[in-house]
Amino acid sequence: MRFLMALVLAVLTATPAAAAPTPDVITGRSAELHPEGIAWDPLRHTFLLGSLRHGTVEVVRDGTTKTLISDPRMVSTFGVHVVRGRVYVAYGDMGLGRRSTPDTTYKSSGLGVFDLATGRPLHVVDLAIGPGRHSANDVAVDHAGNAYVTDPATDALYRVDRDGRADVLVRDPRLGSDTIGLNGIVWHPKGFVLAVRYDTGALFKITRTGRISAVALDRPLVGGDGMDLRPDGSLAVVTNSLGAPGEAAVSVLRSSDDWSTARTTHRTAPWGDDEPTTIARSPRGSRVVDGDLGTLVGGTGTSDAYSLREFRETPVR
C-alpha cells in the first residue's frame, strides 16, 4: 500500500501543470513601435508586428519585441502576412517614420518579401508605379505565391509574382479616394480578392483578371482596415475612426453567393481599444492590434504602448 501511494504521489507531482490561460489583452511596450499590422508566426508560435515609426517587423515575446526584419528601403511597415515560410510586408511612407524625408514621403512604396526563419530579404519590390502619391498598405497572397497589394493613396491594385515581378492588376476610380482609399485585403480560394475601401466602407470583389464588382452590404464598413478570411468562410473586418467617420469595431460578414452580397452576422462595438487596425488568427484565437496610432498620426508625439486584444464574436442585435 505504501508503495502504491508513493507511486501515485510521484505521478501526480511529475505531471506538468496546465498552461496558464492567455490573457484577453496582451499589453506591450516597445520604444515608439506604433504597429499597424499583425501576423501569426507559426515558426516561433507568437505574433509579428510591423512599425510605422521604424519600418521593421518585430517578434513579440512577453509584451516586448525583438527585431526580425530591418531593411533601410522600408520607412514604415504596414500589412504583414506569413505564407509558406515567407513574410510579406507592405511598406510605404506617410511622413511618420524616423527615416521619413521629403524625398520618401508618399513616394516610397512597395512590397518586401523575406525569409521567415532568418529575416533575409528575398525581394524588395518598388510599387510607386505611375504619377501621384503612393504608400502601399496591405497584402494578400494566393496559392501560387502571387501577392496582391493595396495602396490607399492611389486607385490601383498591384500584383507581384513569386519571383518579384510587379504589374498593375487593375486601376479603377472606384478604388481611389481624395483621403484614404483601398485598404485591407484578403485572398479567397475561389480565385479572387476581397478589399475594403477605407473612406466609404465599400467592399470589392476583384478577380485574378482584374474584374471588379462591389459586394452589396447590409451596412458599410466605414473605416475598414485589416481583414481576415476565416476557415469557415466568414470575413472578420476591423474598422476605426483614425481617418474616417467610422467606429472602433470588429465585424463578421458572411456570404451565400460567392460574395456578390454579404450580411453582418456578428459585431463587437465599441471595441475595447480606441484605435484597432488589423487582425490575425492564431491556433489560440484571433488578436486585434492597437498601436496607439492616434498619438503619432495626430502629431502629438510618440508612444511605446500597444495592445493585442482577443476577438470573441457577439451576435448582432
Image (cartoon, rainbow, N blue to C red):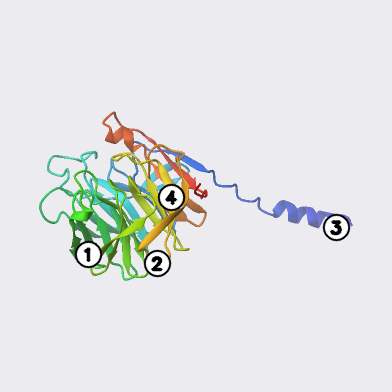
Name the amino acid type tagged 2: Asp
Q: Is residue 122 above or below residue 278?
A: below
Q: Is residue 208 left or right of residue 45?
A: left
Foreground of the two, 45 or 316? 316
**Horizontal side of residue 117 vs 147, given as left or right:** right
Q: Which residue is mark 4?
A: 251
Farthest residue to the right: give it.
1
The residue sitting at 70% across, 54% down in the picture is 14
The kind of residue on which mark 1 rests is Gly
Position of the N terminus by quadrant: bottom right
Q: Is residue 229 above or below residue 239?
A: below
Q: Badge 3, how many Cα within 10 Å: few under 14, some, many 20+? A: few
Amino acid bearing label 3: Phe
Mark 4 is on which residue type? Ser
Report if the CB atoms under discs 1 and 3 are less than 8 Å apart: no
- Circle 2 is placed at which residue position? 257
Q: Nearer the viewer, mark 1 or mark 3?
A: 1
- Residue 3, labelled with which disc? 3
Extreme top residue here? 300
As drawn, is 77 to the left or to the right of 165?
right
Q: Looking at the image, is mark 3 or mark 2 nearer the viewer?
A: 2
Q: CA distance from mark 2 to mark 1?
A: 34 Å
Question: How far apart, in angstroms, are the residues tagged by discs 4 and 3?
Answer: 58 Å
Label 1 sits on residue? 164
User: Residue 174, how many percent across, how many down?
Assistant: 21, 55
Q: Residue furthest left?
A: 131
Say whether residue 141 is visible: no
User: Label 3 vs label 2: CA separation?
Assistant: 66 Å
